């Protein structure tokens, strides 16, 4: 299995190890597999989560040995960081919820970032890279802490996180400012997630910065889903969910399902699309956006434009106007024509406006549906689901629920799976507000206790301990200063 860039599908393909260690491709594109392997979804029923991960990793990373991948999968998912079920499926009314928030940082990013450090360490060994790898992270809330946690004990790695100042929840920011120890830094950027993401891509392309790192035996990589090594583990839990639904009797072997995903950077839903390409019986993917509904408009009309109002919402991890992984999806819809995609994306980068061609749009008809739910609608979903089913949603999953429920047609008899992406306790003020309670004047620990009192949903141990931790000083920088701040942070952490 080799990997090619979305920007130049004719370029010399690279191995899985090179793709993982590099992050983005040198031409600015994203690595994608040359082809999609098949994996029988019924096999998943007889596998543990780690065994399933090992199987799927091996299909793409055949430059690694089975023993290496088995050790990586077990270290990621059987080390005690996750419960035995890892990612359980709960049937809530008509919708099956895939709970992806039982890891160390209580968000779905743990599912991939538990495995990526092991895959990156193996990749460094495969490619002969002996220097330190500097992991750059742009986060809209959850990836930052998950990367800090995942790479905390990874040899030869340092993590630098950029997050939008005022654009994450208080709990998310405190998680980032109390995690990772001396090998990490978290910097608040005066802007939104798109500013952070654009800045990180600029750093990757900055020849002077790259040269300075090279002179000290270091190189860059990414823990965002622009790195295929971050995306690959996300395929696993869709197969695992299907196997659980088979075991629970909510579907029959070979029966198709629909999958709904609350979406910001398009990575989580892209992994579901990749699973479909591998043979998972998925009829349709439902892309759920919040008030920042750029993807809904692009899917419905083919008009992909980011020059529009940006809204800070109660679901901050979805507050994104430029979705990096949409490029990988468009690459497939463009018939893998890297030259045409590059031309269109260059136009989009210049003016934030892209009219996607009719041929590409036809390729997703019947496959991809886009919908959105504003803050009030999401809050109604939190209150309604709690009242009717006694189940507590976080604000992101609530957006997904509102869109999925609007789409769901029981007469079709098709199971609907929704990814539950974060613990509601990461956003106690927003969730309590949706349940009709004010948090004015309440400290974090008081908010957690009140939410527990009203819901009886268990407070995850990592979040219960968070109010008692002392955060590092908050550092705020302008977007144009990200490169300088990166070098300063590396000097402080031992460049």
Image: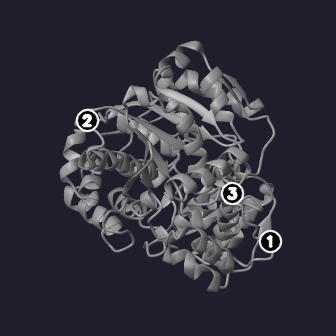
Q: Is residue 101 left or right of residue 242?
A: right
Whether pointer 3 and pointer 2 mark residues with C-beta atoms closer than 8 Å, the reply is: no
Q: Which mark is residue 38?
A: 2
Q: Earlier in the sequence, mark 2 or mark 1?
A: 2
Q: Which of the two residues, 100 or 321, is positioned nearer the viewer here?
A: 100
Q: Earlier in the sequence, mark 1 or mark 3?
A: 3
Q: Which residue is mark 3?
A: 434
Q: Is residue 178 left or right of residue 484?
A: left
Q: Marks 3/2: CA distance?
A: 43 Å
Q: Nearer the viewer, mark 2 or mark 1?
A: 1
The crowd level at tag 3 (other Cα within 10 Å; few <14, some 14-19, many 20+) is many
Q: Which of the two residues, 88 or 66, is positioned nearer the viewer here?
A: 88
Residue 88: image quadrant is bottom left
Taking 219 as reference, is 255 above or below it? above
Residue 320: image quadrant is top right
Secondary structure beneath dot 2 equals: loop
Give x and y (percent) for residue 293: 68, 37
**Residue at image location 42% in from the left, 51% down from the top:** 98
Q: Which mark is residue 440?
A: 1
Is residue 29 visible to the viewer in this orientation of the structure? Answer: no
């Amino acid at each position: 299995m080799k990997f090619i860039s979305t920007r130049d599908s004719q370029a010399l393909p690279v191995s899985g190890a090179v793709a993982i260690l590099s992050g983005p491709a040198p031409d600015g594109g994203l690595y994608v597999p040359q082809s999609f392997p098949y994996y029988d979804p019924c096999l998943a029923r007889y596998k543990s989560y780690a065994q399933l991960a090992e199987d799927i990793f091996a299909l793409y990373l055949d430059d690694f040995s089975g023993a290496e991948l088995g050790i990586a999968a077990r270290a990621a998912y059987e080390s005690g960081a996750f419960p035995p079920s890892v990612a359980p499926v709960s049937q809530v009314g008509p919708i099956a919820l895939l709970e992806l928030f039982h890891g160390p940082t209580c968000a779905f990013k743990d599912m991939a970032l538990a495995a990526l450090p092991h895959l990156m360490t193996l990749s460094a060994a495969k490619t002969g890279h002996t220097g330190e790898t500097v992991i750059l992270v742009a986060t809209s809330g959850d990836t930052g802490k998950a990367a800090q946690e995942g790479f905390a004990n990874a040899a030869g790695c340092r993590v630098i996180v950029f997050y939008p100042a005022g654009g994450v929840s208080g709990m998310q920011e405190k998680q980032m400012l109390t995690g990772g120890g001396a090998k990490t830094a978290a910097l608040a950027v005066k802007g939104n997630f798109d500013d952070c993401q654009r800045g990180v891509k600029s750093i990757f392309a900055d020849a002077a910065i790259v040269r300075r790192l090279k002179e000290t035996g270091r190189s860059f990589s990414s823990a965002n889903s622009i790195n295929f090594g971050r995306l690959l583990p996300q395929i696993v839990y869709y197969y695992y969910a299907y196997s659980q639904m088979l075991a629970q009797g909510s579907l029959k072997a070979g029966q198709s399902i629909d999958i709904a995903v609350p979406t910001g950077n398009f990575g989580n839903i892209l992994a579901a699309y990749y699973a479909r390409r591998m043979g998972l019986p998925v009829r349709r993917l439902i892309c759920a956006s919040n008030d920042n509904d750029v993807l809904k408009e692009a899917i419905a009309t083919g008009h992909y434009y980011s020059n529009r109002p940006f809204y800070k919402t109660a679901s901050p991890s979805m507050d994104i106007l430029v979705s990096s992984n949409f490029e990988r999806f468009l690459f497939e819809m463009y018939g893998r024509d890297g030259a045409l995609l590059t031309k269109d994306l260059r136009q989009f980068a210049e003016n934030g406006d892209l009219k996607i061609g009719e041929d590409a749009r036809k390729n997703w008809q019947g496959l991809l549906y886009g919908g959105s739910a504003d803050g009030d609608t999401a809050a109604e979903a939190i209150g309604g689901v709690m009242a009717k089913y006694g189940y507590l949603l976080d604000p992101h999953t609530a957006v997904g629920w509102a869109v999925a429920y609007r789409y769901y047609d029981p007469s079709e008899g098709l199971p609907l799976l929704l990814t539950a992406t974060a613990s509601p306790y990461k956003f106690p003020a927003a969730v309590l507000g949706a349940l009709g309670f004010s948090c004015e004047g309440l400290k974090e620990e008081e908010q957690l206790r009140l939410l527990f009192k009203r819901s009886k949903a268990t407070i995850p141990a990592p979040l219960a301990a968070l109010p008692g931790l002392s955060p590092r000083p908050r550092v705020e920088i302008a977007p144009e200063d990200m490169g300088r701040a990166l070098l300063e942070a590396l000097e402080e952490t031992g460049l």
